[in-house]
Amino acid sequence: MAGLSALSLTACAGAAGLTTAAPPATGEGLHRIAARKGLRFGSAIGYGAEGSDSGSIGNPAYRAIVERECGLVVAENEMKWQAIRPGPDAYDFAAFDAIVRYAKSKGLDIRGHTLLWHRPKWLPEWVNNYDYGARPATEAARLVTSHIETVTRRYRGTIHSYDVVNELFDDKSGAFVDTSLSTAMRSHEAVVDLAFHTARQELPDAELVYNDYMSWEPGHANHRAAVLRLLEGFRKRGVPCDALGIQSHIEMRTIDRATGIGPYDLKEWRAFCDDVTGMGYRLLLTEFDVKDNGLPADHVARDAGVANYTRAYLEVMLSYPQLRDILGWGMVDKFSWLQGFAPRADGLPQRCCPYGDDYRPHPMRAALADLFAGAAPRA
């Protein structure tokens, strides 16, 4: 869900203020704890030149945390259309290739994110302003098909799970968001179905995922209903989607006095997850972090609240045997997209990730370890 701005910042960041100390967490890494229960834990990571003070492969301290804690990674921005498709017939894989080489060198699996982000804001301007000519549906289909074929063929044998389509809906109304592609093809379903069928044709054995940010807090009912309609439609039309990616950017913009953490619609959220898994879909948590806006400024109280909210959410999600993969959207607070996207009213930085700006673990990290250790084994 994070925007592309982090890519440009990462690429030009210097070494000023870089911390190189090894992470001080003790005991087993999170991925090893999770693996004993048939789970995988990973994180987003970006591209950066060596010595970059960023959440990237170029930051030795950040790399150390990723290598200790994670079994898989996903590029935060470097595989999106804005990064790899500068023009209709041009591709630039340099940054993403560097992440893939790094992951392979460390024995880390890598997820693909994303083959199509269906939002004008997150498509290149050339797509938004494209002249589709006399046969617009045919030309739009060519653009989508050629993109997915090019990417999946390049990483065949390396990437086995893709977010094929990302964020189709307006989160308030539940309506489809229009793009030049859907306008040209005169159907949102036509674009989405084509993306999944093309990915399946190229990757018969890969995990194909629809990814979105519907969540468990109040106010997400229309968004959840729209995603359910989409998944139901996939089954009726024979669209080869295997799993729902739940981004899990969970938030505490206010605090429930009874619990001391953010409010959430547990009954409605369980009903949603039950409906999804009841249709035969697997689940992934693809972009986990915690917005702490409603918590007090005090670090101790805030970290405890974030850890408690993490426990409440993951206790629910880990109760589903269809869930195997949990990925954080970054491991260190200061590099999180939330610092710019969801600033606190008091101006303090979010404490939203498993590790703080000093590369020391937050209580969230201990909560994750306990949750993975206590999870029911997967078959």
Image (spheres, helix red, strand yellow):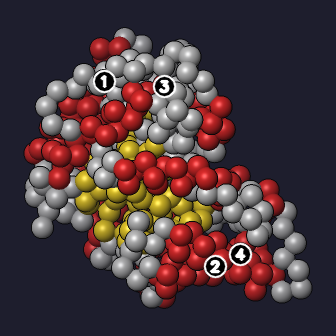
**Amino acid tagged 4:** Leu
- Residue 18 location, x and y as percent? 48, 19
Q: Residue at x 71, y 81 (%)?
A: 142
Q: Earlier in the sequence, mark 2 or mark 3?
A: 2
Where is the C terminus found, in terms of image quarters?
bottom left
**Amino acid tagged 2:** Thr
Q: Residue furthest top?
A: 298
Mark 2 and mark 4 in contact? Answer it, CB < 8 Å.
yes
Rounded to the nearest angstrom, the CA distance separating label 2 from label 1 is: 44 Å
**In the picture provided, is 285 more to the left or to the right than 117?**
left
Q: Residue at x 42, y 59 (%)?
A: 111
Query: Crowding near pointer 2: few (<14 within 10 Å), some, many (20+)?
Result: some
The numbered dot on residue 22 is 1
* Position of 66 relative to 279 (above/below): above
Q: Earlier in the sequence, mark 1 or mark 3?
A: 1
The numbered dot on residue 239 is none
Query: Crowding near pointer 3: few (<14 within 10 Å), some, many (20+)?
Result: many
Rounded to the nearest angstrom, the CA distance separating label 1 from label 3 is: 17 Å
Q: Which residue is mark 3?
A: 334
Rounded to the nearest angstrom, the CA distance separating label 2 from label 3 is: 37 Å
- Residue 189 location, x and y as percent? 60, 78
Secondary structure category for the residue under label 2? helix
- In the image shown, does 341 or 29 lie closer to the viewer? 29
Q: Which residue is mark 2?
A: 145
